[in-house]
Image: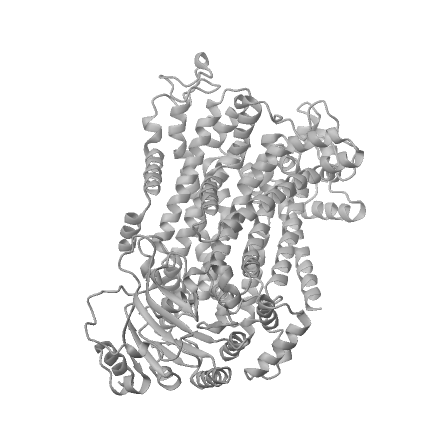
Amino acid sequence: MRIILYIGRRILFLIPQVLLISFITFALVRLLPGNPARMSLGPLAPESAIEAYNVKMHYNLPIPEQYWIWLKGIFTDFDLGESWVNGSMVIDDMIQRIPVTLEVMILALILVAIVLVPLAIITAAKTKNKIVVFFQNITFGYGMLAGALPDFLLGLLMIFIFFTNFGIMPGPEGRLGILEFEPPFVTGSILLDSIFDGDWELFWSGAWHLAMPVFTLAFVYGAPIFKMLRSQMEGALQAEYTTYGEAIGLRSRTIFIRAARVASGPTLVITGVVVMFLLGGAVLVETVFNLSGLGQYAVQAIVTADYAPIVAFVSFAAIFTMLVYLAVDLAHFAMDPRIKIGGSDT
Amino acid sequence: MWLRLKVTLRDLPKWQIAVLVMWVGFIFLTIFGPMIAPYSTIEADPTSRLLPPSGDHWFGTDENGIDIFSRVLACPRTDIVIAVAATFLSVFLGSPLGVVVGLYESRKGAISTAGADIFMRLLEVIQSFPVFVFAMVLVAIFSGSLVNIIIAIAFVNMPVFVRLVRSEVLSLVQRPFAEAARAVGNTEMRTGFKHILPNATPTVVVQVSVTVGFAILLTAGLSFVGAGVKPPTPELGAMIASGSKYLIIGQWWPALFPGVTLGLIVFSFGIVGEIVNKVLDPRVVRDGSDRRRVLSVQKTSGKESSVDMPMKVMTTNKSPILEVKNVCVSAGEGDDQGILNDVSFSIGPGESLAIVGESGAGKTILLKSVLKLLPFPLEINSGSVHFESSDLLAMDRNQIRPMRIRQISAILPNAKSQLHPLVNVGDMIVGALQAHEKIKKKQAQKRAVELLTMVGITDPESRLAAYPHELSGGMAQRICLAISLMYQPKILVADEPTAGLDVTIQRQVLDLTKDLAKEFNTARLIITGDLGIAAHYCDRVAVMQAGKIVEANYTDKLFKNPVHPHTKQLLGSVQS
């Protein structure tokens, strides 16, 4: 019961925060250089047309009033506004692009979970075992490299090596080859939709195109998760309770699982931060690999001073971030009895 | 701190010294880079476009025919200056805010805490903007001049420092020195800025070293998408962006050289951050040379204690349960002096032996050797440990495991920290039972209740659901006792079994241990710094100093008639 109240309170808090964020963004983007009316109607358009355009887009009203209209639009007919650069509805663009970003992001997290997480756990033990020491050396190198390699640089290097030189991977042409058509829209994920369509050839092409971006993201953004898990696991394996567990003859498996439980709490928290970061940080990787995801959308919108998409993106990111944090807090609470929920949560 | 700096630098691995030198090189380039560039860094030369690396142009030329080597030399001036300036700006804005918020929050009044709360929510709002996009918007709005980029990056990093300083203030404000500063008449703000903030400096400096690296990546990233520093200013991200077109068609040099440079800069700042962390944070333990200090063990000297001690009582007259012979322990290879030196004793059924000594004498190491639980670098070099007829040192972990608590049981100091923080009492006991016999969970729980009753815990059913942090020290100790005696073991090894308990509870727990051990005919090896415990609860006492047993005798004889100077010293410190 308390937990439901807590979730309710957090979500209640979320509403004013999201409103504030969207309003700040709404006001900020109107400071962006460039006059939308002039840019969309061209330099030769008469002054009257400019004025008519501004009235149509409500740009002539004070900002709070514009914001109010925008807000009403969302609740009356899911209208997030219109991009004046290509005249499309922002809500449609978002529906097209969110799955792209989520797909890359989720695949990268899965890669982290199946490769880096086991590696972090294996290499946490202090031992002389040759295989473990070998992996420890490898992961030491990984830790060094991953902290220093910018994601866009890693992406470019991979394209240079595997596309330009060896020609075994597709170049930065987006999610599919230039001559391939997207499968019928169901979820927006190329991989899932091509499976639904039964088109396995397209599925493999999609997977092949996603391989390098996913690897890049996992390599760069998996590092904080890896480092946290490893140091937590190291600490847990040397903690008194682990020695005691051994002293009372618990099975190694039990001891290990219990240590991993301790390590998973802080790891989960840092994963939440990484997930949040991936949403905005994937911008660069999307640019490098030409993926038409949310990040690229936001970048293009900022460069062209396209108001509505920026506001929509930032608001979406804010809601997403806060929900991720809420989920992380709840999971952490479920895992660790020492955490009191609803107390001081700052 | 200077000493720590010296020690840290001396102990630095070679490769880190190399990175440090490289870092100094980048700082040098930040100051002098543009001056020592062999060619102009911004003037285009259409006649020499995209030349591959050669003797004239070491890194080749870019699409405008500008020498890439020269531009790379000039880049740190842009990237590092932006990152460092932005980081310091966010420190100078964020730290005072953090102090104020922390102080307000630590006050009792409802208005001030509410104010601080609202401020923290606002910070949350700023932080839930996607950093990169937020920085892009800021730069785009205020035009991409150098100063504006710095301000934008500083702004997105500021909340980190506010939060950090605030949490430091919250924990420091209750420390005695802060209270003292207020007591002598400093105002709250003055205390905050003059006394508390300086104490938060190490944490802030460590965060600064992390943030600089992040800020360099952010600067380069912004410029890479064209939302940061604009060409022709030499900047790594922008250079990589303009080179990336050619990278894909095989002309690798315009993007690769700035790329590698960027990686090296971030890498060197990361390593320097770690070094700074080592210098400033006393909790970071350097491995290798000083692990002995970590274990806080005295060196055995070898020369001492020529007094011929009555050592015969170290062995039991009965057939021994536990027999330790000439055990030596050292910290792995290359450690010739050793931590335990030639320790021998034995215990018969139902007997009790105390090993006393100052902290650091090697008592705990001795106990861990007997239990085969030595921490990683330590190992037993010679000697033998026998449990009845089986040679413990020859057995591996899996062979010993079934013997634990069934035959050899252990109690370790501070029961609360021995119990796993995420496992409740019931699961802890059930887990121990299930590790040693095939038993259904229901039945195991029933046994757990019986065991808790045995050690005198009232209302045992409801205690099963309690977690260690909800238990008192005495309660936790009783639970550990229940676990260690549940199979009526042949021997119980206890290390400071009453550490951290108050005196009346100590007595209860020790009496209980003694009674149960008598009932089960369990032998006891008790390791303690408290001579009183040894005197009351053990038949024999051995005195340990610097890894050696220097004297041993029956309890009453030892206390009446100590021979070894160290024993006298220990007794003297009790009496005085």
Q: Position of residue B509 (x, y in %)?
A: 47, 83
Rendered-image quadrant of the C terminus of chain A: bottom right
Q: Position of residue B46 (x, y in %)?
A: 46, 14
Task: Residue at the far top: name it.
Answer: B47
Quadrant in the picture for residue A284 = top right
Q: Residue at 22% across / 65% down in the picture?
A: B302
Of the pair A150 and B195, the residue shown nearer to us: A150
Of the pair A189 and A72, the residue shown nearer to us: A189
Of the pair A339 and B524, the residue shown nearer to us: B524
Q: Is B368 on the left or on the right of A160, as rendered? A: left
Q: Is A298 on the left or on the right of A202, as rendered? A: left
Mark yes or no: residue A232 visible. yes
Q: Is B323 on the left or on the right of B421, as rendered? A: left
Total numbered badges shown on the rendered structure: 0
Q: Position of residue A241 (x, y in %)?
A: 50, 65
Query: Taking A276 as reference, is B447 above or below it?
Result: below
What colour scheme governs how the chains and residues are painted in the rendered image of this protein?
one colour
Rendered-image quadrant of the N terminus of chain A: bottom right
Q: Residue at 43% across / 77% down in the picture?
A: B497
Q: Residue at 31% across / 53% down in the picture?
A: B289
Query: Taking B334 as reference, is A7 above or below it?
Result: below
Mark yes or no: residue A59 visible. no
Q: Position of residue B234 (x, y in %)?
A: 43, 28
